[in-house]
Amino acid sequence: MNPFLDVLLRAHPQAEPRLRPWYAFAHEVALAPRKVTEPAIGQIRLKWWAEAADEILDPATTPRAHPAVTAWNDALDPATAPAPGLVHALINAHTLDLEPQPHADFEALRADATARWGNLLRVGLQLLAVRDDSHHHAANHVGAAFGLAGSLYAVAPEAQQNRQAHPGLPLSPEKASPQARREVADHTLGQALYHLDRAQELLPRPVSEALPVLRLGVAARALIQTAARAGADPLALPPTAHAAQTFVPRLTWARVRGAYA
């Protein structure tokens, strides 16, 4: 599981039983296309997870046997079951992981970040019985911010796998000059900050039930500020685990202030 999500759940134990099984399910979905070398096999794996999600969300169906499927099915309250479309949108987003150059331009990267992380958070909100539009719009912006910032940390690891994590950089990012890489990063971080500001503008005071989900915005800000302090060169950024180390005190301060980004 993403280390930021794990810390976030541990900091909000009242919501953890409902959210952790969903995040674990989503983590397995994210791993599925990474375990294959043939795109066709990856498509089959993602279809398997889409069908598993349908079985979980249908009370009349017995889900297939898999630890992540069983755990989410057992934890799911039918009264707060998420919209299937959100779950499928997240699963479908991972088809891009089967492509070496998944994003045509920055807007495609933004859309992908929202589809992955925004939908992850929106499902989380629904599991916590938070369904009003303002919270879901804010979740999309928080997800976009987290995904955009995270794309910079993925540049070097993805390049080692012959994959392009950011459309503003070549498949071999070392071929771009340090200045060019920093310019791409500065633009990306600026857009991530825009999404956090937009979330807070749309939703200045979220309900307390939503904070265990929306506080991924604090993690997004940790990624942004850590990257900026490291000089904003994607090839010189520390591992995300370094930024995650700053998340606990940031989260403590956010809880004191009642903030989420």
Image (tube, rainbow, N blue to C red):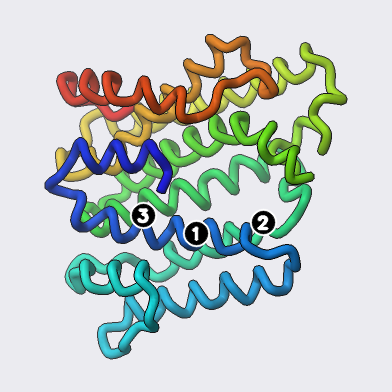
Q: Which residue is mark 2?
A: 96
Q: Earlier in the sequence, mark 3 or mark 1?
A: 3
Q: Is residue 168 above or below residue 41?
A: above
Name the kind of residue labelled 1 in the image. Leu
In the depicted view, which residue is nearer to us: 226 or 87?
226
Q: Which residue is mark 1?
A: 90
Q: Is residue 192 above or below residue 211?
A: above
Instruction: Give the numbered dot on residue 23.
Output: 3
Q: CA distance from mark 3 to mark 2?
A: 20 Å
- Disc tally is 3
Position of 136 with respect to 89 (left or right) is: left
Position of 103 with respect to 247 (left or right) is: right
Residue 206 in view in this figure: yes
Place residue 237 in its image quadrant.
Answer: top right
| Residue found 30% across the figure and 34% down from its top | 215
| Residue found 55% across the figure and 13% down from its top | 228
For mark 3, give the secondary structure.
Answer: helix
Name the kind of residue labelled 2 in the image. Leu
